[in-house]
Amino acid sequence: MKALFLADLYQMKMHFKYYGFFVLLSAVIAVGGGIGGVGGMGMFFPIYAVLMCSVLGTSLMQLDEQSRWNIYVQALPCSRRDQVSSKYAVTLACTGAVWVLFLLIYTALALAGYMDWSLVLALGELLLLIGLLAPSISLPPMFRWGSAKGRVIYVVLVVVLASGMGATFSAPDMAGGAVELPGPVAAALTVLVPVALFAGSWALSVRWYEKREL
Amino acid sequence: MNAIETHGLTKTYGDFTLGPLDLTLPSGCIMGLVGENGAGKSTTIRLLLGMTAPDGGSASALGAPAGPDMRAVKQRIGVVLDDVGFPAGLTARQIARVLAAAYENWDQALFERYLRDLDIPADKKFSALSRGNRMKLGIAGALSHDAKLLVLDEPTGGLDPVVRDEVVDILSEFTRSPERSVLISSHIVSDLEKLCDYIAFLHKGKLLLCEEKDRLLEQYGVIQCDRAFLDGLPAGAVLGKRLTPYSAEALIRRDAAPVGTEVRPVTIEELFVLLVKEDMR
């Protein structure tokens, strides 16, 4: 898998330089927004940065298909599981790095008195949820149907999920806060559920990709 | 040990069926897989490398059954596919680092020697290389990890004659060591004629012949005659023929030719063309 991970890193360096620039810009805006008390600015850019990093794996897959590297790899001493794992590892590494960066910024802002600790925790959970949920949904269809069809299916899934969540949370009993968990339990669930989804998504991608006729 | 074996290997894609295929490549030999476009050469190679699952039969490479997990044996197999598919944005140097991470026996000095000898730009993006340089880079990669079996799918297709000659020279050098085997597919038969010990003819997914090249050349010959003479030959003697309004040219078994018949040597290309034409009739 090391070889594939290295190839992915080179591809990222070549094609996604602007991601790094955008993350740095987002970090500056997050700091500025936090100090200036402009919460919306401080939240939008970090979320967008994490979201961008979380779809890196799918973008790399598209590049692999264009150059037929996804086929060539199979002639090397690498398994399909390795191919899947490399994309998940790259996604996790990039999303994780961005997540840690913003968590450090928020922590620094909280220590300096510009932000509540409860908000730091909430933002940390939110970024983690978005960062892991997006690739968990987007990658399996890509491995099952290829990047072109996979992207369409991903968009459809997101629309269905968003509509379902919207309908659920706008229901009268939910809007009234009928489901309320103790703080630590909710916090643990917010961390554990995305991690479990990510792991399950990897297993599903491996299973699908191993069966796919290329 | 045989470098490659297939037994009753079959694979169906829509209305195309490959096989059943029975091939054996002894260790230390070079086999040319000859066939027109769409004959099933690439499918055979993909099956041998476990890149696709067969519908029936079995295949093995260097003693290991072909299948989804051939990681260990692929350490000893060098592969060049017809469309060398390295990541477009990577340079030869970066590709070498990727391959070094994949192969335990990667020989960086040897790879760099190939880059120099074959005049491959080391710092140009793969997407910016010519088809000839891409193929040469693929071959350099396949030869730089002490492979015992080299599998090449149309390595000379689309190359100009000078580059083709260079590629043939590299492969000749590789096969000087008796422990190394090569399976090479091509529809450019003249390249294979220079290199191969064994020739396998594939046509529309079926194996027409698989034989030692020298035996093929000994067993078969070409006669030029009139139609009446051709019609008088025993059944089974003629394997293929080319008829014109004035004469006939036929591929025949030398041992079945009537005494005194002038039989000229056949080239592998003629052998293949005449066999395929007979089959299409």
Image (cartoon, grey):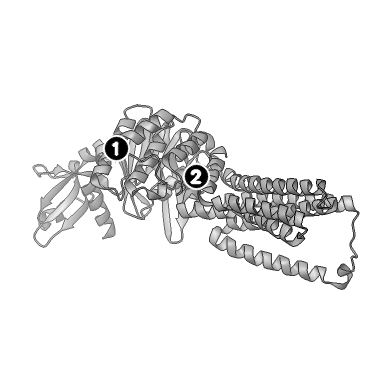
Q: Dot 1: what SS?
A: loop
A132 left or right, relative to B77: right
Are the residues under marks 1 and 2 on the same chain? Answer: no
Above or below — where is A74 with respect to B242? above
Residue nearest the viewer, comparing B222 with A14: A14
Using the rendered image of the protein, determine whether residue B212 is visible from the camera's viewpoint. no
Density class for disc 1 (Cα within 10 Å; few <14, some 14-19, many ≥20) is many
Residue nearest the viewer, comparing B217 with B150: B150
Using the rendered image of the protein, determine whether residue A182 is visible from the camera's viewpoint. yes
A9 left or right, relative to B91: right
Question: Going 47% across and 47% down the picture, which residue do you hit?
Answer: B87
Question: Going 46% across and 40% down the picture, which residue do you hit?
Answer: B95
Figure label count? 2
User: Which residue in the structure is indicated by mark 1?
Assistant: B196
Q: Chain of mark 1?
A: B
User: Which residue in the structure is indicated by mark 2?
Assistant: A73
Residue B25 position within the rendered picture, expressed as x and y whole percent measured from the top left: 38, 36
Question: Going 23% across and 45% down the picture, which residue do you hit?
Answer: B161
Residue B108 position within the rendered picture, expressed as x and y whole percent measured from the top left: 43, 30
What amino acid is labelled 1 in the image? Answer: Cys
What amino acid is labelled 2 in the image? Answer: Val
Residue nearest the viewer, comparing B278 with A35: A35
